[in-house]
Image: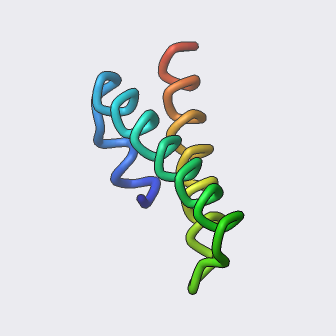
C-alpha cells in the first residue's frame, strides 16, 4: 500500500488492514522457512506495509 492510500483510510480500516498485513507477513515468513519462496521480497514488502500502517495509526492516536 502507498502512503497516499493509507492516509485515506479511517482508523477502523487502519486497524483491520494492520491485522490483515500482520497475518500475511507471518504466513509468508512461515512459508519461507518451510520452502523458500519464489519471490522473498514479498516478506520485505509486507513488513514495510505493516510499519506504514502502524505509524499512521500511532500518529492519528497522538493527535
Which residue sits at x=39%, y=41%?
A: 20
Residue 21 at x, y = what percent?
A: 46, 46
Horizontal placement of 20 versus 25: left or right?
Answer: left
- Residue furthest bottom in the image: 38
Query: Is 14 above or below relative to 8?
Result: above
Res. 28 image quadrant: bottom right
Which residue sits at x=47%, y=51%?
A: 24
- Residue furthest front in the image: 34
Horizontal placement of 46 versus 8: left or right?
Answer: right
Residue 45 at x, y = what percent?
A: 58, 65
Res. 62 image quadrant: top right
Residue 15 at x, y = what percent?
A: 39, 27
Horizontal placement of 10 versus 38: left or right?
Answer: left
- Residue furthest top in the image: 62
- Total count of labels: 0
Query: Is 30 above or below relative to 38?
Result: above
Amino acid at each position: 500500500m502507498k502512503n497516499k492510500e493509507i492516509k485515506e483510510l479511517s482508523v477502523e480500516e487502519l486497524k483491520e488492514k494492520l491485522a490483515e498485513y500482520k497475518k500475511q507477513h507471518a504466513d509468508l515468513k512461515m512459508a519461507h522457512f518451510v520452502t523458500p519462496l519464489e519471490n522473498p521480497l514479498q516478506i520485505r514488502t509486507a513488513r514495510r506495509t505493516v510499519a506504514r500502517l502502524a505509524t499512521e495509526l500511532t500518529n492519528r492516536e497522538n493527535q
